[in-house]
Image (tube, rainbow, N blue to C red):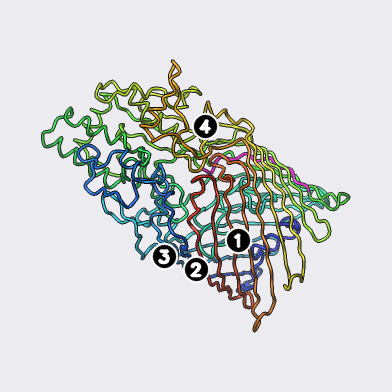
Amino acid sequence: MINRPSAFKMSPVAVGVLTLLGVATLPANAANWQVGDANISLDSTFTLATSIRTESRDYSLIGNSNHAQFDWSGYHAAFNPIYTSNDVWSQANGAYSTNGDLGNLNHDPGDAFATQVSGTHELDINFGDYGFFARGFWFYDFEQMDGDRPYSNSITGNQYDLCQDPEAEDLLCTDIRLYDAFFYGDWWIGDKPFTLRVGRQVISWGESTFIQHGINTTNPVDVTRARAPGAELKEVFLPVGMVYASLGLTNNVSISGYYQYEWERSWLPVSGSYFAGNDFAGEGGQRQNVQLGFSGNPDIDLDHLLTVLNQYGDMLNGGASETDLLGAYALYGTKVAIRGYSDAAHHDADDQGQYGLRLTWFAENLNETEFSFYHINYHSQRPLISGKTSDFSAEGIFSDLAYLKENTITKDNITDLGVFTQSEFYYPEDIKLYGMSFNTNIGTTAFAGEFAYRVDEPLQIDDVELLYMGMPEQLANSDIAALRRDDLAGISQLNNIGRSVGPGETAEGYLMSDTWQMQFTASHVFGPKFGTDNFVLLGELGYVNIVDMPDPDVIRLNAPGTSRTPSLEPTADGNSRDGLLVGLSDGPETNPFATDDAWGYRLLAVADWNDVMAGINLRARATFSHDVDGTTPDPLYLFTEDVKSAAVSLTFDYLSKWSATASYSAFWGGIGTTNALSDRDFISFNIKYAI
């Protein structure tokens, strides 16, 4: 396909890793044509794959109010609440949030959660030292497009359709995509080799294999494709527009760099999909809202909320007074927060201002070790959640009621109502990374490592503290006696860092800290050992440190499974407000919060047997992941203490044209309920054909 010597040379570790992961660096089967001076090649891979849940649902991970013993039909927050929060908390033993259980409820054990046909097509038009490369991809998921989900909303009874939202459909259900599309060229500047690429492309720097958030940070990630059955790495990293150049300064020293003229955010799992740990942040999330009641109220979805709001509008137009409906309307503002539809919820980063530089030195006298030094300036591709606070003032609520009277409320204009806290997603800019990496060989063992230091990396403040500022503290600010709750004043930790805000203002939900991360990788090729034709073992160890980790008694950072706060901010006279904490959330959070450092390791073993039958080769692959100590804050998504996972697979390959793979993946461990995937074991099958 793209044959460019020297300028794109891979390290020994990279070549070995690609082999271990089963990723072809050069397609074995391609259609080729010679048209004049142009050599045209087209490589295609077709995949049929499915994944099936194998493990029963763990109801400790399901929000209390979503447990089967509760019948919420006919629910109305003002006129028919059905259960009190204490009723729910005393009768169930589940999670204190219903904001992360939709993916679990949507998929029963024994059911497929994905059945896809897909195709990847790579075109290379080469004129010797110049050319054009493009990669396209398409897929159709029969299970998502044509299957039914077992979960129905407990209020409306509506079955959840993962493909209803157009953007969610593109990510999860069916789509046609153009990935890479760039021009490339190689030539000499004097006696120095020079390479240039212009267009949508992927830049892969650093030496990381499994542990993310290292130096390789240029391209956003499609998390949904990363978990899709039969998916390959080239479907996961999203190409973006940039200019890349590399120049050999000497035989042993080269410099390379890029300027990125297109920014794209990473694509989170679709709301309600199998691996989604958040019900509102991904595409389709507007339909779920953000539940505020610590699972003391049911899942109030957008359909129910729109119905109620438009009923209020009808009542106002039928003669009801704003004063009569004030309390009933405001009550829904205490039950849910909302988010804008699709892109309306996102404050995207600028396309300009991202770049990277790398200096590489091949040290022949130091065991032929390759060293690289990096500087990267980039904008966050991962969302940081902030919030527009509720407005419970008389002026604000009467303005909302007047709006209800004059307008039909839809998904597009619900954010015009001020009574609801609104979740918004920000992507801070100009994060600076300084790093170095190395790779070398000692005998038949390859060693590699990297170090990355980030200046002013954004970290997510605990979402409960953000929601406390968004809604309860605004009840304390209300000038309506029937709504005012003086006891809620100052309960959010945001007050400790000078971020107390009033009604209708934005509460910034992240802070900046320097961070550093290092990881080491070793892989050994044993050759024909242990009854195999080739056996390879790889291990990777990673460590992360939050340099400016705040005192958790001042401000806590968000971590998986922390649905409540461990304590409320005390009053000026020293009252700890323990009774209020019990009333708000049935007591304190018991799961651990983020720590100032964390580490873990990953293992991979691959065994090959050649020509086991009629030209068929067999590969067995096993991985193991263990987050040993500490938990990284969001949005690093690296380590959650004691979480473990493993996967095993068998792949049969025939002439590098046909392959069939069966795999089993398991998740376990974690402290308390911090491991949202601990009941999500699954089995996958795929068949591939390459031409």
Q: Nearer the viewer, mark 2 or mark 3?
A: 3
Mark 2 or mark 1, which has the lower sequence index? 2
Q: Which residue is mark 1?
A: 133
Amino acid type assigned to the residue bearing label 3 in the image: Asp
In this view, the residue farthest toward the left is 319
Mark 2 or mark 3, which has the lower sequence index? 2
Asked whether 388 falls inside the magenta stretch, the response is: no
Give the magenta range: 371-382
Q: Quadrant of residue 293?
A: top left
Could you classify mark 2 by the number of other residues whose Cα lies within 10 Å: few (under 14), some (14-19), or many (20 or more)? many
In this view, the residue farthest toward the front is 90
Q: Which residue is mark 3?
A: 111
Residue 26 horizontal/vertical position (percent):
66, 66
Could you classify mark 4 by the number of other residues whose Cα lies within 10 Å: few (under 14), some (14-19), or many (20 or more)? many
Q: Nearer the viewer, mark 2 or mark 1?
A: 2
- The Cα–Cα distance between marks 2 and 4, rounded to whole angstroms, is 42 Å
Q: Which residue is mark 4?
A: 556
Amino acid type assigned to the residue bearing label 4 in the image: Arg
Tag 4's secondary structure? loop
In the image, taking residue 487 as reference, residue 177 lies left or right, namely right
Q: Quadrant of residue 390?
A: top left
- The Cα–Cα distance between marks 2 and 3, rounded to whole angstroms, is 14 Å
In the image, taking residue 682 as reference, residue 89 lies left or right, namely left
Q: Quadrant of the N terminus?
A: bottom right
Residue 601 horizontal/vertical position (percent):
66, 50
